[in-house]
Amino acid sequence: MKTFKILLLAIILTSTFACKADNKKHTNKFLATVDASNIKAEYFIKVALLLDTSNSMDGLINQAKAQLWEIVNELSYAKCQNERPKLQIALYEYGNDNLSAGDNYIRKILGFTEDLDDVSKELFSLTTNGGSEYCGAVIQESLNKLDWGNEDRYLKIIFIAGNEPFNQGAINYKDAAANALENGVVVNTIFCGNYSHGIDSYWKDGAQLTKGDYMAINQNQQTLYVSSPYDDVIIQLNSKLNKTYVPYGSNGIAKRHIQQTQDNNAAEYSKANAVSRTVSKGSHLYNNSTWDLVDAEEDANFSFKQLKKDDLPQELKGKTTTQIKKYLEAKRNERAAIQSEIKALNEQRRKYLAENTKEAPNELENAMIQAIKKQAEKKNYTWQ
């Protein structure tokens, strides 16, 4: 009997639940007798951004900063098996002379993270400098150093952007592409320049080897912002939303400061960009459980018993656990109400923008969203 239980547990833990509509037809009959009500598969969209930060790429970096939140907002509508996938973003820079030649002028800035404020912070810290761009090397580096996971249900995507020949460097891009394909990672290439020039310099080939998409953009194109009648109210709600965060731990105050700084960074581009960030903060993708007690309390690994008194904010010091829980519940309810208002207003905003925007969409944002949706469809992800 003991052997049977061990075998049964091993089967459950090692089974892969791919996100496909016909999975139920192929379910193992033996597993069908198991009560799996407490087994909940998680879904992730994992996106690694590999950005060329050589001299000519200031426009690319500006587009990434300015269009991040609209990309996040579009991904917030993704769904699979009635679950909303989590979003993890990793960030690399390459081709910058300030980086080490011994590391092929590559720097891992962020591993996969759900902390969107950290992603924004690091994008705004990027600077450009002339260098050698080794696409094969940075792709291989991201495959080696990032935690992609083995689950087939995960959507695993690389976006590499630059403007020098794709075949430079000691690591052959074809070998890196083969490794990506073997690990279920799709490589999408974004050439900053003429479409045909990108093909001639192997950027299209780099994408096609992993069944990814090749795109060409004008990296110096200014980001298009369209205002709506709902913008002012949404921005006002952002100020109210920020007051629902309860920082804790050694870096709580610092992280709340980063949150405010990224609000300011978004607003520097335009009011519309500040609205886009606020909409992201109103979605399920914006989670700050590492420093906000409201989010942390909902984490399965969180325990009040492990919470030190010194980790508490001033307003909760000396409070009992019951009093703290009551305080957090009030903050959570307040936040939920504000986020509900933001979502409702954003639906009206989206409708307004669809009816009143005639200009071509922003190139980087549009290219990334189209590629992600196309590749997500193969795993039966939907947008709703």
Image (tube, rainbow, N blue to C red):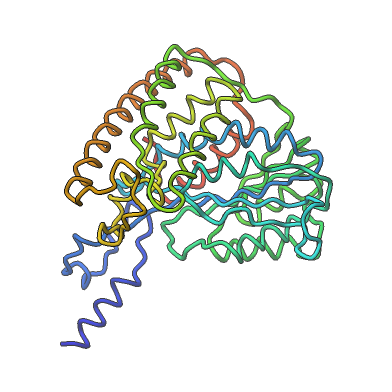
Q: Nearer the viewer, residue 170 or 333?
A: 333
Left or right of 280, for residue 179: right
With respect to residue 235, does 244 lie above or below?
Answer: below
x, y percent for residue 250: 44, 53
x, y percent for residue 290: 41, 52
Residue at the (67%, 40%) spot, across then down: 215
Residue at the (31%, 53%) spot, across then down: 299
Q: Quadrant of residue 2?
A: bottom left
Left or right of 374, for residue 198: right
Residue at the (45%, 17%) spot, across then down: 231
Farthest residue to the front: give it: 318
With respect to residue 18, does 221 lie above or below?
Answer: above
x, y percent for residue 377: 45, 45
- State which quarter of the image contains the N terminus: bottom left
x, y percent for residue 25: 27, 59
**Looking at the image, can residue 127 be seen?**
yes
Left or right of 270, for residue 251: left
